[in-house]
Amino acid sequence: KELQVPASPDVTVYYEDSLGGPAHEIDAFFQDVARELETAIGWRLLESPAVVLTADRGTFIRMVGSDKVAAVAIPRKQLILIDHTRMTLRPFTLRNALKHELCHLLLHQHIESSRLPRWLDEGVAQWTSEGLSEILMKRNPFLVSRAVRTGDIIPLRHMETSFLMSEQGLLLSYEASKSI
């Protein structure tokens, strides 16, 4: 499919014809989202990112290799991929998803990736985006406290570079990162 690109100095959005409205929304609120992140974290965004907005869930899954997420940041490429089909589901909103993924890029612009533990990267992104996680599984606010009580909590050292990929392990990893 041919992708369109609106002209903007702050962000480049690649989108299919059917997503012209959401692409222009991103362009319209990008500066506000970036400033909110910069204020919260105290660092400036050093590079303008590119955003790929997809209208097909299957295409998105093939691009990211997982059906458990709705958006992904790829820091080494200053790229954010967003599955627009999931943005109308609660609690997902296009603005919060962008803010969450942009936070990952901002952190990686200032901290060498090898020195930024995954749990910290994810926890800060959730904090700045009002608890939004890009995972699509059912949230459980008691999951971490139950894991602590039962001794099933995942040690931080096991979440430094990646999260467990089982549904329960992934959910616990995200919830633990958010709570930290």
Image (cartoon, grey):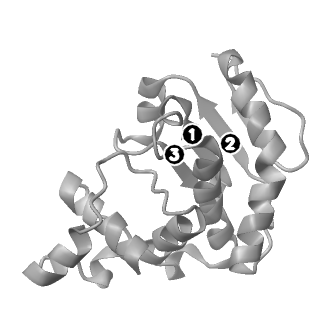
| Kind of residue at badge 1 | Ile
Dot 2: within a 10 Å radius of its alpha carbon, few (fewer than 14), some, or many (20 or more) residues?
many
Which residue does the image show at 51% across and 65% down from the upper left? 126
Query: What count of labels does the image hold?
Result: 3
Residue at the disc numbered 3:
71
First reached walking from the N terminus: tag 1 or tag 3: 3
Quadrant of the snapshot with the N terminus: top right
Q: Position of residue 152 (x, y in %)?
A: 13, 76
First reached walking from the N terminus: tag 2 or tag 1: 2
Q: Is residue 174 visible?
A: yes
Q: Secondary structure at mark 2?
A: strand
| Kind of residue at badge 2 | Val
The answer to which image quadrant residue 125 occupies is bottom right
Q: Which mark is residue 82?
A: 1
Task: Check whether the beta carbons of the residues at disc 2 and disc 1 lie within 8 A of each other.
Answer: yes
Q: Which residue is nearer to you in this view: 64 or 132?
A: 132
Q: Position of residue 28 (x, y in %)?
A: 83, 42
Residue at the disc numbered 2:
51
Q: Secondary structure at mark 1?
A: strand
Which residue does the image show at 53% across and 36% down from the upper left? 87
Task: Check whether the beta carbons of the residues at disc 1 and disc 3 lie within 8 A of each other.
Answer: yes
Q: Real-space Cα distance between discs 2 and 1?
A: 7 Å
Q: Is residue 101 above or below residue 25?
A: below
